[in-house]
Image (cartoon, coloured by chain):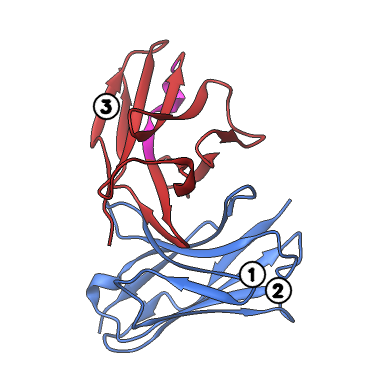
Amino acid sequence: QAVVTQEPSLTVSPGGTVTLTCASSTGTVTSGYYPNWFQQKPGQAPRALIYSAYSKYSWTPARFSGSLLGGNAALTLSGVQPEDEADYYCLLYYGAQGVFGGGTKLTVL
Amino acid sequence: QVQLQESGPGLVKPSQTLSLTCTVSGDSISSGRYYWNWIRQPAGKGLEWIGRIYASVTTYNPSLKSRVTISVDTSKNQFSLRLGSVTAADTAVYYCASLGSDSYWGQGALVTVSS
């Protein structure tokens, strides 16, 4: 089974910009992996932010954007807010099978 | 607004079968718009994709495939998870969710495997 790798932790200052990445053990991540990004705060269910690499939901704040960058899927937060402190998970599809990354703990400090 | 709600026993004995149901409200489960998924999360750990059902076609995590069944009951607007031969390693919060362009999650159900 493929392995999806994310940074275990990142720290960003309020108002700053940070990029989280999502890599596949099988090689370059393309749109065909339909990258999804989720945010999870303590004690809460995950909330979807991005699907199909770039697409946002109606509830996704404008400061979040998804992309394909350097062979990986990426989630960029611009103008980070304190409430963005959370765990972030990517999900890649290998055919119909989904595989989550291990998650990135984002600290806003 | 689509809402999902997990239900089922919170305690399962080792070697037995874990059964959970996800009740969908706000739309028809058979509308064809949604991929219905089960996902789990052990305490303090990351998310694990268990499997999904779409148009009666199921796909499972290879590491769980021999023990998992996901099914849909259109008459009740529900879909279900069965995980057999459970061990303590299956203790987790189990989420039902639709993923993709329409993404909705249940609040999660804690299932503990213990004698």
Based on the picture, tell me whether residue B108 belongs to the magenta stretch. no
| Real-space Cα separation, disc 1 to disc 3, in angstroms | 37 Å
Q: Residue B23 shows which numbered tag?
A: 1
Residue A42 at least partly seen: no
Residue type at numbered disc 1: Thr
A9 over B2 or under it: above or below: above
Tell me the residue that label 3 is attached to. A10
Q: Secondary structure at mark 3?
A: strand
Tell me the subunit letter for badge 1: B
Counting from the top left corner in percent of width and height, residue B40 is at: 39, 62
The 10 Å Cα crowd at callout 1, few under 14, some 14 to 19, many 20 or more, is some
Tell which chain the image draws in blue. B
Q: Contact (CB < 8 A) between labels 2 and 1?
A: yes
**Residue A55 % position (x, y):** 58, 35
Q: At 45% across and 78% down in the image, what residue appears?
A: B9
Q: Which residue is mark 2?
A: B77
Q: Which chain is red?
A: A
State which quadrant residue A2 falls in.
Answer: bottom left
Q: Give the secondary structure at mark 1.
A: strand
Label 2 sits on a secondary structure element that is loop
The x, y position of residue B27, in whole percent, is: 76, 61
**Looking at the picture, which amino acid does disc 3 mark?**
Leu
Residue type, label 2? Asn
Q: Residue furthest bottom?
A: B16
Camera-side residue of A55 and A81? A55
Q: Residue furthest top?
A: A15
Sequence order check, earlier mark of 2 and 1: 1
